[in-house]
Amino acid sequence: MAGGFDAIVVGARCAGAATAMLLARAGYRVLMLERARFPRDTLSTLYIHQPGIALLHRWGVLDAVTATGCPPIERVVHQVDGVRLAGSVPPVDGIRAAYAPRRYLLDQILADAAVAAGVDFRPGCTVEDVTFTDGRATGVRWRHGGRTVPERAPLIVGADGMRSRTAAATGAVLLAAHPLLTCVYYTFVAGVDAGFEAYGTTGRWAGSVPTNDGLTLVATYFPQSEFPAIRADAHRAHHDCLRTVAPGLYERIAAGTPADRLYGSGDQRNYLRQAAGPGWALVGDAGHHKDSITARGITDAFHQAQALADAVGTDLHDPTRLDAALAGYAARRDDLVRDGYRDALATAALRPRRRLRLLRAVAADPALTERFLATMAGIRPSGDLATPDLTAAVRH
């Protein structure tokens, strides 16, 4: 096929940059196009669970993340209506700590790693369309300034977020969709002694995540149905939620120093799109998005980047073998996100009291607590909690 590239990746944040980097390391010529200019922050829970950190270590970029001064997070707290589970998550490939780097740092680190691998990175470029030949994606048209440029490649990867133009252009089928469940507000506070902590009750959720520069991200969640009322006085709602749902955390936050304004979103979509088709694939939020309440988005994006690179292997220039590889990736992507999608929908319903008997039984057993925290991190499937002993304990 004519053209100077083997793959074109649309989007250069954590999903796109990781995918471009891995494809380039496999020997492919990769063009990565990004509408924004780096460094730039974005709405995010920041947290990367241990499986995602293990991938950063495998890719050789974890040292760059820790060099930013982002603190390691080795203990977590999950509390619902006074039932408290606290402990450490089991290690993954020897990695015990999670991290929550600011996105303007993480995205730049991954983009730099992609460039170091040989990726041609062009920020400030808008992809207008995906081009097709005989029903197969064979290129894109992108714009920079007043100039539109056509570019061809055997593989087009959409990593352009929840409102993906690539997904729309390829006609990616919607496999699952659920209503908006929560709205979220967050800010940053300095001087707070807090770890990765989550507190829930009916209709409310609050949490904290330590990040760079001695700051702590503080987030509150509310039912989507209340978004108009919450938005009308967001500061009051945010503080009231913290005070009532997590009074201990609230006291620590009140003793800290506000370091940023309050941000919010009522557009946390829940869907699963077709992951691949002839000559194209979607990674990250372009193909799958869920409520941020479980903080699984970045980790999922890393898993998908690795899965796509593994599937493509050396088959990129044989259309028949590439189609088979992309079909394999699509099936693997669905397997990777299915459990976490279900968990996010359940948590974002903000009805945690339905699980109180289960949580009480788990909290009474250190081994079950560790297993529960492992499911929250995506290390083990949620079904691993359905042991005979736990089932019997819940019944009693």
Image: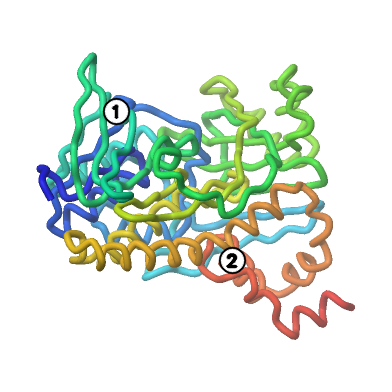
> Element under label 1?
loop
Q: Residue furthest top?
A: 146
**Residue at image x 65%, y 58%?**
343
Q: CA distance from mark 2 to mark 1?
A: 34 Å
Please tell me in which quadrant of the rendered image residue 388 appears: bottom right
Question: Tag 1: residue type?
Answer: Phe
Q: Residues within 10 Å of mark 2 (few under 14, many from 20)?
A: many
| Relative to 61, 274 lies left or right | right
Please tell me in which quadrant of the rendered image residue 247 appears: top right
> Element under label 2?
helix
| Relative to 11, 378 lies left or right | right
| Quadrant the C terminus occupies | bottom right
Question: Tag 2: residue type?
Answer: Thr
Vertical position of residue 22 compared to residue 91: above or below: above
| Disc assigned to residue 38 | 1
How far across and how far down the image is residue 289, in percent? 54, 46
Q: How is the image coloured?
A: rainbow
Vertical position of residue 346 compared to residue 209: above or below: below
**Residue at image x 43%, y 42%?**
167
**Residue at image x 56%, y 20%?**
261
Residue identifier under label 2: 375
Tell which of 230 and 176 is nearer to you. 176
Tell which of 235 and 194 is nearer to you. 235
How far across and how far down the image is residue 14, in percent? 36, 44
Q: Residue furthest bottom?
A: 388
